[in-house]
Image (cartoon, rainbow, N blue to C red):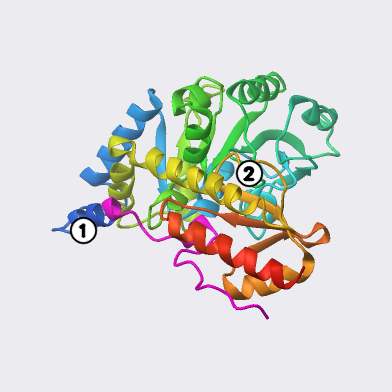
Amino acid sequence: MPILPPPPVGSFVSDNAAGVSPEVMEALAAANVGTAMAYGDDDWTRRAQARLREVFDGPVHSYFCWGGTGANVVGLASVLRPWQAVLTAASAHIVVDECGAPARFTGSTIVPIPTDDGRLSPDLLTPWLQWQGSEHHPQPAVVSITQSTEMGTLYSVDEIGALCDAAHAAGMLVHLDGARIANALVATGSDLPTMVRDTGVDLMTLGLTKDGAMFGETVVFVTATRDGAPLDAEARFVRKQAGQLVSKSRFVAAQVLALLEDDLWLANARHANLMAARLARSVEAIPGVRLADEPQVNSVFVHLPSAAIAPLQQWSFFWDWDLTVDLVRWMTSFATTDEDVQRFAAGVSAVLAGHA
């Protein structure tokens, strides 16, 4: 076993492993003064909802939830019936990493569509449209996309618009899982009105936990109505039944306000993306390391010698991605430092030298 340097203080296992932005901690402390009405009937929640309307530049309706899986469930269950189906990429979080929660709580069928890079296209939707109108098949009703995807790839604004056009033409809604939407926005130089509202996305999960929040994600209904009724007509009932109604809502709202203040959420995401790029540059020349692709956001996918993966994980843990091709994933965050990157690269170099 080679002699290894000290592991980095910040791990590369996940952006969920990072702590909380100092500004968010300050906001939580400020909200922790006095009493406030529960279940969202408080000034903090009202101010955060108003701020979200400003950020989206439109009359969106927002609902705070405990976490990302819960937010996806609340959004989807609010617009689906049990005989309907969600079309999504096979690698999507709602397929792979939510323990079947969307299928359980909606009663609907989640259709995983194989893709090369985690992205859907209008052509990939077409074969499933033949189910429409047949009582023998679940009825495609929602297209769910992830931005950025689980594979670290991005949709362009035009690609999202094309998907929305195709979905709407087929009578379907579009849901966007935005757990890492901030990383996508800074990577593409876009904003929420352009990427979400103007493209035609109907509802989304706005993620902030991976971007410096302690907890809490937001379901945002962008489209106002469907068939003459509010699109979010059932959301508050679904949220309560699904156990996602936060009683002390001000503590989610305070985090939303803090992260949106002066675009802190975008600054955090920009830093995370930058650290991923630096990590890629720091390891790409190490013998035995092969980048799967150039990082687009805050994820670095790397092929390593199979014998080196476990020793590296023992030294500084990270998740493997596909061991059939020796592919692993390293994630950066708003809290990743240059020293973390340098230490990790040094450890990779040392371990791989010992397995040359």
Using the rendered image of the protein, determine whether residue 13 is visible from the camera's viewpoint: no
Where residue 154 sits: x, y (%)? 62, 35
Dominant secondary-structure state across the stretch colored magenta:
loop
Magenta stretch holds residue 17: yes
Give the structural element (helix, strand or loop) at label 1: helix
Question: Quick one: 147 or 201, which is closer to the camera?
Answer: 147
Residue with the mark numbered 2: 152
**Callout 1 environment at 10 Å: few (<14), some (14 to 19), or many (20+)?**
few
Q: Which residues are magenta?
A: 1-24
Position of the C terminus by quadrant: bottom right
Relative to 241, residue 348 above or below? below
Tell me which residue sits at (74%, 59%) in the image: 288
Quadrant of the rendered image containing residue 296: top right
Tell me which residue sits at (45%, 24%) in the image: 193
Tell me which residue sits at (51%, 71%) in the image: 7
Q: Pointer 1 and pointer 2: residues touching (CB < 8 Å)? A: no
Query: In the rendered structure, which amino acid carries the disc numbered 1?
Result: Ala
Residue with the mark numbered 1: 29
